[in-house]
Image: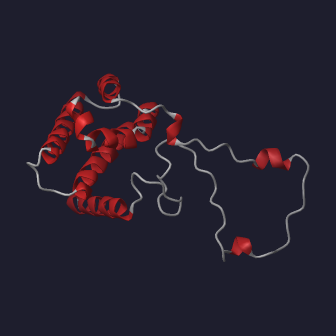
Amino acid sequence: MKEVSASLLAHAIGIALMSGCVGFECTRSESPWAAGPGVALAPEEPRAGSPADSPGPSPPAVPGAEAATSVPPVVTPSAHAPLDLKSLEARLRETQAISVFTKLALKNQIEDLLERFRAFHQGRLHTSWMELRQSFDMLMMKTLALLQDADASLAGALASSRESLWGILSDPAKLATV
């Protein structure tokens, strides 16, 4: 049963990656996690042709009701300053959200991914950008899943650093300094 669940989860993640919902901006209906872990989502705007478009009786105005029904401000993942690789490494080492053995496994996966990017930039690895991006996104999602409950601030910082980290990996000159 666990093999089937893991297979279905991997398939769902693959579909999310191919549909562009992971690592890109999506509407709430496309992905409930589009805003990142621990981030409040604003209510969706009504779409054209939806029942909310049809004119109907509006509820009577009640004094003071607007304060009780106001929506809290939306916090985006970019509220965190993007992490550089050194500070990310330090914060991952310090966090109590991940066990020691999981940190070692994660470190090995990160090193393997870095080596794949180096080999790609040197022409030793014949793969596509899409496959490298998928590997990067899968590792990001795994790391975010490990952090989201126990270290939400690091998870938010990591989510907001996603594109800057991708920029480092995709630029051979920047990757050479890592």
Residue at the (38%, 64%) spot, across then down: 19
Residue at the (70%, 47%) spot, across then down: 71
Coloration of the structure image: secondary structure
Residue projecting furthest to the left = 124
Image quarter where the N terminus lies is bottom left
Tell which of 23 and 109 is nearer to you.
23
Give the image quarter of residue 108.
top left
Image quarter where the C terminus lies is top left
Tell which of 20 and 122 is nearer to you.
122
146 sits to left or right of 153: left
Residue at the (42%, 41%) spot, across then down: 159
Q: Percent from the top left, x then y, of residue 42?
A: 62, 51
Give the image quarter of residue 102.
top left
Residue projecting furthest to the front = 173
| Residue 19 to residue 51: above or below | above
Q: Percent from the top left, x then y, of residue 60?
A: 90, 61
Tell which of 139 and 5 is nearer to you.
139
| Residue 144 to residue 3: above or below | above
Give the image quarter of residue 107.
top left
117 sits to left or right of 14: left
Residue at the (30%, 38%) spot, across then down: 168
Q: Percent from the top left, x then y, of residue 122?
A: 12, 44
Q: Percent from the top left, x then y, of residue 172?
A: 22, 40
